[in-house]
Amino acid sequence: MEEKTNNKKVEVKTGAKKRVCMVCGKPSPATICEPCEAKIRGEALEHKHEVEKAGRTDTGRK
Ligand SMILES: [Zn+2]
């Protein structure tokens, strides 16, 4: 039995497209570069704090 080796593996090369940080726009291997990620995490924590605070004062609303 002969096995035909089909080279039909189509690899979608996304590497051709330059990846940049979606926050600062600098070339980055990740969607968001490390400095921005750290910053966002910090802001997220702050935001969470704000939400908790707002939740207390905003109790009568649905
Ligand atoms: Zn960035």
Image (tube, rainbow, N blue to C red):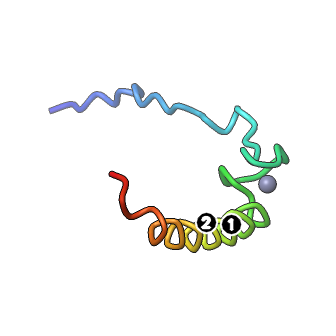
Q: Nearer the viewer, residue 13 or 46?
A: 46
**Ligand 1 is within 8 Å of the C-beta of the residue at disc 2:** no
Against 46, is 62 above or below?
above
* Mark 1: few/some/many CA within 10 Å (<14, 14-19, 20+): few
Against 52, is 16 above or below?
above
The three-letter code of the residue at mark 1 reads: Glu
**Ligand 1 is within 8 Å of the C-beta of the residue at disc 1:** no
Q: Secondary structure at mark 2?
A: helix
The three-letter code of the residue at mark 2 reads: His
Q: Residue at x 69, y 54 (%)?
A: 32
* Residue 2 shown left or right of residue 54 in the figure: left
Q: Which numbered disc, 1 or 2, marks the residue closer to the eye?
A: 2
| Distance in Å between CA atoms under marks 1 and 2 | 6 Å
Badge 1 vs badge 2, beta-carbon distance below 8 Å: yes
Q: Which mark is residue 43?
A: 1
Q: Nearer the viewer, residue 29 or 47?
A: 47
Q: Position of residue 7 (x, y in %)?
A: 42, 28
* Residue 37 shown left or right of residue 50 in the figure: right
Quadrant of ligand 1 in image: bottom right
Q: Nearer the viewer, residue 43 or 19?
A: 43
Q: Quadrant of residue 17?
A: top right
Q: Which mark is residue 47?
A: 2
Q: Which mark is residue 20?
A: none
Q: Position of residue 61 (x, y in %)?
A: 37, 54
Q: Position of residue 26 (x, y in %)?
A: 85, 47
Q: Quadrant of the N terminus?
A: top left
Q: Position of residue 47 (x, y in %)?
A: 61, 66
Q: Residue at x 75, y 48 (%)?
A: 23
* Residue 51 shown left or right of residue 46 in the figure: left
Against 21, is 35 above or below?
below
